[in-house]
Amino acid sequence: MISPRLAASARRALGGLGMGLVTGLAVLLGSQPAAFAQGRLDARYEATLAGIPIGKGAWNIEISDDVFSASASGGTSGLLKAFSGGSGTGAAQGRVVGGALVASHYSASTTTAKKTEAIRMVLAGGNIKEFAIEPEPPVDADRLPVTEAHRRGVYDPMTGSMLRVPGNGDPLTPEACRVGAGIFDGRMRYDLKLDFKRMETVKAEKGYRGPVVVCAVYFTPVSGYIPDRPVIKYLAAQRNIEIAFAPVAGTRILVPFWMKIPTPLGPAMLEATQFITQATPPRVAKTQ
């Protein structure tokens, strides 16, 4: 039986999971014709804590030659839902520039039994131009302020979880993991650094079967957080968080297939049960 205390701990574990992803989602691309620069993904995920199902979610991505969009939704499930029902959505849109995803808008909303909160951001060239949280949260003197400099050269959480691998060869290589990024989620600014761990083979219940590149993830809070919060200290100290990335067909974009975070209650796991991805033909210009 899941106790109320375990339910609260599971919520914190999922919250930490969201920091790494968004939270947060074929075929090898090295053999694709160069003309293909577009693809789509329809993925479904299940979250577990110590092997107990606690949530389900979906992630849909559309990438064309010049624009992209991504949307995600999820909520608690199983016994956890009886103690702590909650749901959330997120979306990002923007342009594709030189194969890279450059977001222009990001939004997210969460709903629990106690409240509903919405976050909206406008971005330009990796800088946050506008952002708002509704309802506006109360001022907390212990929260480290986010400066204007902290809102420059950053990704939103959803775009930041999609890796673009330069080059023309197989994108599933150790080099795909050797990157880092600054993330601003509307409230907190933090850095994520990846490092290569290993290669694995995965098999979704529906869709993708094949290799993934497994990266270690290191979380460093920068601003917009309360230093004494246990979940922040715990995540910053972790050296065993892992994400396995799989490709979106027709592109050089990798997205999470599974993610693992150790917790005091056992491993928190987010894993794709469905990962259907396909390349789409490039748009042909109309002629008169």
Image (cartoon, rainbow, N blue to C red):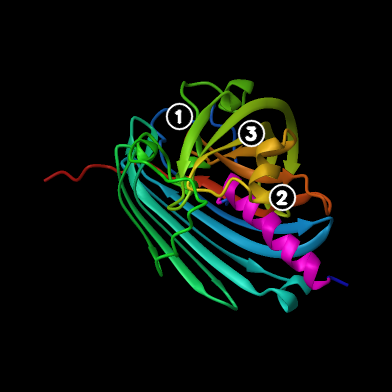
In whole angstroms, how far apart are the C-alphas of marks 1 and 2? 25 Å
For the residues labelled 3 and 1, the Cα–Cα distance comes to 35 Å
Considering the numbered disc 1 on the image, is that residue within a helix, a strand or a loop?
A: loop
What residue range appears in magenta? Answer: 3-22
Number of the label disc, if any, that sits on residue 228: none
Along the viewing direction, whichever of 226 and 24 lies nearer the viewer: 226
Q: Are marks 3 and 1 in contact (CB under 8 Å)?
A: no
Quadrant location, the N terminus: bottom right
Q: Which residue is mark 1?
A: 33
Residue sitting nearer the eye, 108 or 232? 232
**Per the image, is 226 magenta?**
no
Which residue is denoted by mark 3 in the rendering?
218
Residue ID for mark 2 = 204
The x, y position of residue 190, in whole percent, is 51, 40
In magenta segment, residue 5 = yes
Q: What's under tag 2, amino acid-wise?
A: Ala
- Element on which disc 3 rests: strand
Give the secondary structure at mark 2. Answer: loop
